[in-house]
Every structure is written in structure tokens, then in C-alpha cells.
Amino acid sequence: MAEGRRGAAKRAWQAVCWGVFGFFWLVILNVFWTKMAPRLAYLTGQRAIANDPPCSTPECDFSAFWPAGMLARHGRFEHIYNAALFLAYQREVIAKTANLDAFFYPPPMLLPSVLISYPPFEWAFFVWTAGGMIAASWLLRRAGLSWPVIVLGLLSPASLWNTELGQVGVIGGAILLAGTLSAARSPLRAGGLLGLLVCKPQTGVMVPALLIGQRNWRALLGFGAVCLALLLATWLVFGPACWHAYLISGGPRTAQVMNVAFNPWVYMGDGVSVFWMMRSLGAGVTVAYAVQGICALLCMVAVVWLWRKPWGGALERVALTIFLALLTTPYGYGDDMAAFSWMLAALAEQRGWRIGILDTLFWIWPMACQIVAEKTGVLLTPLVVVLVLVRTIHDGRHGGDETARLAPCTAV
């Protein structure tokens, strides 16, 4: 009788947890649709407008990728990495009242930017977004994730936020996750796949530690070869002028953006880095960089140890690698947490879809973090990531299965 009551209580609690989870997720899905639906009108001839939500710039971050590709096609690299010149060009080709959304990426990112710059701006946004989602789904399915996990990740708050912005967090996270899942069984291909992250190096900062920890020299070779190939391709396609402009103007501009005082009402409130958390707590630039550097070093050592002396199940090791990567980079945002969300879904699947209230917090956090930062003045995202790490370590100590939930799909 007592056993039956305990079982009924557990089922009731699960129903409550799923109810809370579903309510908050549906709210976020509704907000997402409210913001995205007007953009569909752009495809019927209406031009993008300057106050396009959520960032008062048409299609948000995509308004940096598309004009950068246009400029690169004409060899105007000084306009790409000079903030004032780039803003003037954005207002010329997109909207006269567009706000500043500079291009901070290294020159390899200009290769996909050039390709997407050929369609009209509004159409290019949807091609860019849909193409990233399709490619991410294909990569993750080939890497072994189930379709429910893949779809849940694509509809996660982190991925929805990425879609609103027109960013590359979904495809970047899928590349990192698929490469990590596949590195042991298909090293050269997985290493080459991970090498694509040279376009957005802050996403791939943990890759060398992962491959060294696995002693996976073939994957490391593939990673290095693709990185080098993309760097050479950038040089051959655009010439040395793009690198000169990046080093002279792009690098200093990025440092300037990083080092300003913490303001939760702008991009920093959506940050994920230890550096910005320290800045929100009042630390100076030097102290914040020092703490970030120590944290990054400890995370890399942890990943090397994690794979050199296998601990827990395969899925837990992959998850911990993805979570630690978020604490390693000084420059990252909530839309870069797509891989984080896929791992939350995969771990929930491994538990038989049993979730708690904390799972709701972890799931919605990539969209909630800026609201909390605005209310408190403190960036709490790294602490949330630490909570996820602790929970994953706890679960791994209690019976992680070496092959849990990694379907036997074809290797990447």
C-alpha cells in the first residue's frame, strides 16, 4: 500500500514538473512566433523595417553577415572591419535607420557570408536559417542522436533565440556536438568537421583539449588540416587585404566591445562567459580576464582528464565536454547554448524523460538570462552552467551506461 502511494506521488510530481515545463516553453514559443511572423511578410515584397524585434535592426545579427558578404565580394575589407564604415553601408543596402551591428568574425567567416549574400536580404535570412537547421539535423542524426532529441533541441529557447537573431549558434553547436560524438569511431571525418569551427573559434576552443584527452591523433590531424585549409582558402579567395583589415581594425574593435563596463541592458546581459560575470560583479578588466583564464585552463584540464581516464557513461562525458566549453570562452551568448540544450534533451531521454523543476530552469535559461541580468545587475549564466555540471556528475556517478541512448547511426 505504501509502495503504491509513493509511486502515485512520484507520478503526480512528474505531471506537475511537466506542466510547469510545458507552460514556460509554450510562452517562449508564442513570443518567438509573435516576433518571427512579421518577417514572413518581407518575402512578399515588403522591405525589412528598422525596428524589427528583438534588436531594432532588420533580422538582427544577420544584418552583419549579409552586408559583410556583399563587401567581401567587392574587396572592400576596410569597410567590413571599420564600425563606422560598416554601419554606413548597412544603412545604404538594408535600412536607413539600422542600428550598429558590427562584423567581428575572423576572415574565414566571410566564405559563407559571401555565399549567402547573393539572394535578396529577406530571402537570404530564411535560406540561412533553414539551411542551418537542416544541416544541424542531418549532422546530429548521423552522429547518433534520436529524432525526438534533435527536434526538441531545434525548438529549445536557445535555438529559437538563435533563429530570431539569424546567428550561427545552431549549426556551430551541431558541428561541435556531432564531432564530439563521432570522434572516437570516425576520427578523420569528425576532426575535419570540427575544423569548420575556425569560422567561429570561440565555439571550438575546447576541441584540442578533447582530442588530446582522447589521444585521438587522427582526429587532431583532420582538425588541423581543415583549419589550415580554410585559412589558406580565405587568403586565396580574398587576398591578404582581408587579414590586414581584420588585424588592424577587427581585433581592436573586438577588444573594445569586450572591455567596456558591464551593462545588462545590451548584449552583455545575454552573455555566458565567466569574464562578463566577473565584470557584472564589479571586477576590473585585468581581474576578469585573469579569472576567465584560470577557469578556461581548469576546464581544459578537466576535459583532458575526463577522456584520458574514462568516467561515467559516454553520454555524460560528451555532455560535460559541451558544458565545460561554455565556461572556457570569454565571448559567448545564450544563442550559443544550442548544443547545451541538445545535451539536456539527450540526458532527459536517458533518464526515461523524468524531469524536475531544475530542468525547466536549465531549459529556459538561454532566453531568461537577460531578464534576470536586467533585474539583478549580475550575469548568472556561468553559475547555471555549473549547476548543470554538478547534476550531470551526480547522475554519472549513479550508473551512466557506456552506450546509453547513442543510437547506432552511421558515423559522420
Image: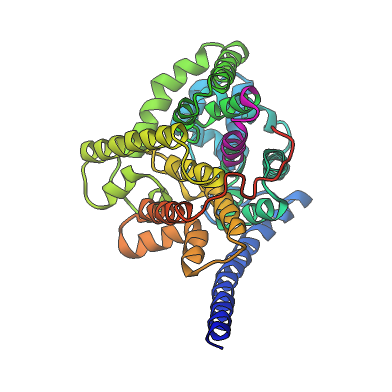
Location of the C terminus (image quadrant): top right
Magenta range? 173-188
Measured from the top left, where is residue 225 in percent x and y? 58, 16
At x 36%, y 27%, the residue is 252
Residue 404 drawn above or below residue 358: above
Q: Is residue 33 visible?
A: yes
Measured from the top left, where is residue 31 in percent x and y? 59, 65
Location of the N terminus (image quadrant): bottom right
- The dominant secondary structure in magenta is helix
Q: From the viewer's side, name the closer residue of 80 and 346.
A: 346
Left or right for 135, reference 205? right
Measured from the top left, where is residue 249 in percent x and y? 41, 24
Q: Is residue 205 visible?
A: no
Q: Is residue 384 magenta?
A: no
Measured from the top left, where is residue 245 in percent x and y? 46, 19
Residue 80 drawn above or below residue 6: above
Residue 174 drawn above or below residue 45: above
Left or right for 56, reference 149? left
At x 51%, y 11%, the residue is 240
At x 69%, y 54%, the residue is 151
Left or right for 122, reference 242? right
Indicate how the structure is coloured in the image. Answer: rainbow
Q: Exactly how many numbered labels are in the figure?
A: 0
Examine the image and state in which quarter residue 76 appears.
top right
Residue 9 drawn above or below residue 352: below
Residue that sits furthest to the bottom in the current view: 1
